[in-house]
Image (cartoon, rainbow, N blue to C red):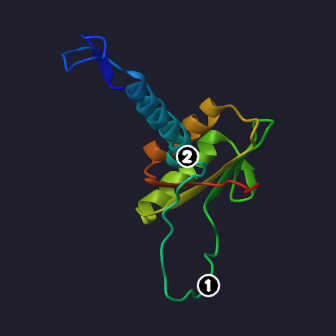
Amino acid sequence: MAGTLSGGGRGRGMISGINVTPLVDVVLVLLIILMVSANYIVSRSLKVDLPKTASSDSAPEKPNAVTLSRDGKLTWNEAVVSEAQFVGELKALAAKDPELTLMVSADKDVPHGTVVHLLDVAKVAGVVKFAINVQPE
């Protein structure tokens, strides 16, 4: 019954109360749908916009890769360098190629702030494109 009749159910009268049970049921169903679909909305991977090509001739001769190790060493194109050396070489490369992409790899135990500092230093040096190297599980 949708409501309570004032006449005790014998005749037609005004509804003096509204049954909210169906409303609560609908709200709970919508809440469950929202909770289940929220898992699909959140992305679990890094989105990388890779260039598309019909054919590939060769790989780049020397990738521009920087690696932060767990013990704080900075490796630039497979050579251990200081931050000042890294910045100098990166500025020179960015001046030659404004579309330079820097591949950043960091150990999972490296603090987040260190990686952000490295990205900031590279951006100040003129690099506008970054790629973060991850390993699939």
- For label 2, the residue is 87
Residue at position x 65%, y 55% in the image: 133
Neighbourhood count class around disc 1 (C-alpha, 10 Å): few under 14, some 14–19, many 20 upward? few
Asked whether the viewer can see residue 17, the reply is no
Left or right: 46 with respect to 2? right
Q: Is residue 118 left or right of residue 1?
A: right
Q: Is residue 96 above or below residue 104?
A: below
Between residue 8 and residue 117, name the one nearer to us.
Answer: 8
User: In this picture, is 120 found above or below 137?
Assistant: above
Which image quarter holds the C terminus?
A: bottom right
Residue 130, position as x, y percentages in the image: 52, 54
Q: Position of residue 3 (x, y in %)?
A: 31, 20
Q: Nearest the camera: 64 or 22?
A: 22
The residue that label 1 is drawn on is: 58
User: What residue is shown at x 18% (from left), y 16% (from top)?
Assistant: 14
- Between residue 133 and residue 99, name the one nearer to us: 133
134 left or right of 37 in image = right
Q: Secondary structure at mark 2?
A: helix
Residue 68 sits in quarter: top right
- What residue type is disc 2 on? Val
Residue 126 in sight from this viewpoint: yes
Q: Nearer the viewer, residue 40 or 21?
A: 21
Residue 99 percent location from the top left of the image: 43, 64
Point out the residue furthest to the right here: 71
For the residues labelled 2 and 1, the Cα–Cα distance comes to 28 Å
